C-alpha cells in the first residue's frame, strides 16, 4: 500500500479510537476530503476494512 495512504489511514485510526458513531460522521467526512485533496483513492475493499476497524474502536 502507498505510504501516503498508510499514513492517512493510521491518522484516521488514531482519531477514531473511542469515538461514538455520532462523532464518526464528521471524522469520516474530513478523512474523505483530505484524501481527495491529496489525490488518494481507496478501493471498495480498503474502505470496507477502514470501516470495520473504525467500528472496532468505537465506544458504545
Image: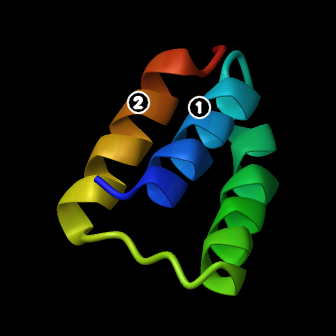
What residue did someone put label 2 on?
53
Instruction: Give the spatial CA distance, label 2 vs label 1.
Output: 8 Å
Is residue 3 found left or right of 2 in the rendered image? Answer: right
Vertical comparison of 9 with 14: above or below: below
What residue did someone put label 1 on?
13
- Locate residue 5, reporting x and y percent: 47, 57
Residue 7 is drawn in which quadrant?
A: top right
In the foreground, 38 or 26: 38
Extreme-left residue of the structure = 45
Residue 60 is drawn in which quadrant?
A: top right
- Locate residue 18, reporting x and y percent: 70, 16
In the foreground, 24 or 45: 45
Q: Is residue 57 visible?
A: yes
How many numbered discs, if any? Answer: 2
Is residue 59 found left or right of 39 in the rendered image? Answer: right
What residue sits 45% from the left and 52% below the top? 3
Vertical comparison of 18 with 55: above or below: above
The residue tagged with tag 1: helix, strand or loop?
Answer: helix
The residue tagged with tag 2: helix, strand or loop?
Answer: helix
User: Do the numbered discs 2 and 1 sit on residues whose CB atoms are within 8 Å?
Assistant: yes
Using a 10 Å C-alpha cutoff, classify the residue at mark 1 as few (fewer than 14 neighbours), some (14 to 19) or many (20 or more): some
Rendering colour mode = rainbow
- Locate residue 46, reporting x and y percent: 28, 56
What residue sits 68% from the left and 25% below the top? 14
Is residue 39 found left or right of 11 in the rendered image? Answer: left
Amino acid at each position: 500500500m502507498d505510504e501516503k495512504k498508510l499514513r492517512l489511514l493510521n491518522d484516521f485510526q488514531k482519531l477514531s479510537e473511542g469515538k461514538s458513531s455520532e462523532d464518526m460522521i464528521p471524522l469520516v467526512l474530513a478523512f474523505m476530503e483530505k484524501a481527495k485533496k491529496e489525490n488518494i483513492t481507496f478501493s471498495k475493499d480498503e474502505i470496507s476494512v477502514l470501516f470495520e476497524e473504525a467500528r472496532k474502536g468505537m465506544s458504545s
